[in-house]
Image (cartoon, helix red, strand yellow):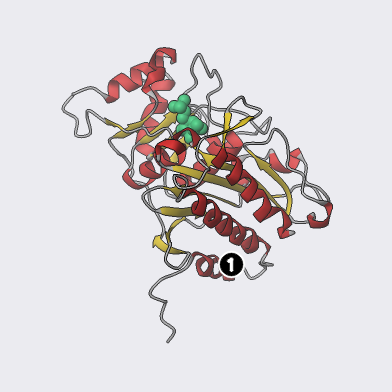
Amino acid sequence: MITKPKFMTLERFIREQEESFPKATGEFTAVLFGMTLAAKLVWREVSKAGLVNILGTTEQINFTGDILKKLDLFADETLYKTMYYSGHLCAMASEESKGLIQIPDKYIGGKYVLIYDPLDGSSNIDANITIGTIFSMFKRVTDSGHGTLEDCLQPGYRQVAAGYIIYGTSTMFVYTTGQGVHGFTLDPSVGEFLLSHENIRIPQRGKTYSVNEGNFNLWDDRIKKYIQYLKEINGKPDHPHSLRYIGTMVGDIHRTLLYGGIFMYPADKKNPNGKLRLMYECNPMAFVVEQAGGKASNGFQRILDIKPTSLHQQIPIFIGSPVNVTLCEEFLSGKR
Ligand code: P6P
């Protein structure tokens, strides 16, 4: 009898998942393999950022007006260089680029679209606080040739894969292809991501809420009422709730995925449509959290049902344990 190896590498796990799809051509697997390589290349720079001249900012401002950090640029270039020549992509879109990223004609023809935030939370880089990479994959809807916006602007429920790499106390690759959520921890001594969190399930409820309370006076009254409720000492077992917020969506949601609770970035007077981006951040994280048994909404609608209108569309996001998100929605709808 063949027994499972003491450890399961990410590549082996992906290949075993592929075996359950008899018609699989290996293209999807190849794109995921590319992401694992990109993750290791970014990890290698992130893990020694303090030792080499890669901290700090470049002289560039990205098109959203953010100062481009050196690691932002490195991560963006690394994902592009690792992924474009796979031959399995028809289009790529990066949170750091305004429009679609051109894939050289020679490498065009794939049936997949890859959308990514190369380095989420980059304002935390120089303080050595957790940062991450987020990715989302769709199957193209156009027939052939270079992918178009139509191939990218699909509702989140059509994603074929999504996940994130979290560069924290350890580096983890967490992803879903619709068959649950699985986490792999990088063993630097062998340079392999090893299965450490198989079939992650989010707790049904949690006592942690995660939001930038500095925006309190910019919020709608209903959000204010909800946050005040979380702080009440009312004899209920999970009151008062605890606030945890590191300012990196990947880190705040990874903690929420494992411990339960809710992460939110509501709309406010500064960001009337919300700050976080539907395609690069909210859709992939919503796919992961839903696959772990959680819930993700814009306060009124399931995020994965939202029909995108533009690549950099921003939305409010409330994501985490189903009990917590449902309660939040009740406040937002005025039921509470
Ligand atoms: P604020 C990081 O810049 C980011 O895009 C997310 O990772 C994070 O959740 C959010 O913005 C933090 O925004 O306004 O609280 O600094």
Q: Is mark 1 within 8 Å of ligand 1?
A: no
Q: Could you say where residue 279 lies in the image, as x and y percent from the top left?
A: 61, 37
Extreme left residue here?
235
For residue 285, side relative to residue 244 (left or right): right
Placement of 223 over or under 175, stated as above or below = above
On the image, which quarter does residue 95 sit in? Answer: top right
Residue at the spot x=44%, y=84% of the render? 2
Residue at the spot x=40%, y=47% of the render? 168
Work out whether residue 178 can be spotted.
Answer: no
Find disc 1 in the rendering and name its residue.
18
In depth, the one of 61 and 206 nearer the eye is 61
Q: Could you say where residue 164 lies in the image, as x and y percent from the top left?
A: 50, 48
Screen quadrant of the N terminus: bottom left
Placement of 292 over or under 55, stated as above or below = below
Residue at the spot x=62%, y=26% of the render? 64
Q: Residues within 10 Å of mark 1 (few under 14, many from 20)?
A: some
Placement of 234 over or under 85, stated as above or below = above
Picture mark count: 1
On the image, which quarter does residue 88 sit in? Answer: bottom right
Residue at the spot x=36%, y=17% of the render? 224
In depth, the one of 279 and 179 nearer the eye is 279
Screen quadrant of the C terminus: top left
Determine whether the residue tagged by mark 1 lies in a helix, strand or loop: helix
On the image, which quarter does residue 94 sit in? Answer: top right
Q: Could you say where residue 13 lies in the image, as x and y percent from the top left?
A: 50, 67
Extreme bottom residue here?
1
For residue 47, side relative to residue 98 (left or right): left
Work out whether residue 170 can be spotted.
Answer: yes
Q: Could you say where residue 140 lies in the image, as x and y percent from the top left?
A: 73, 49
| Amino acid found under the numbered disc labelled 1 | Glu
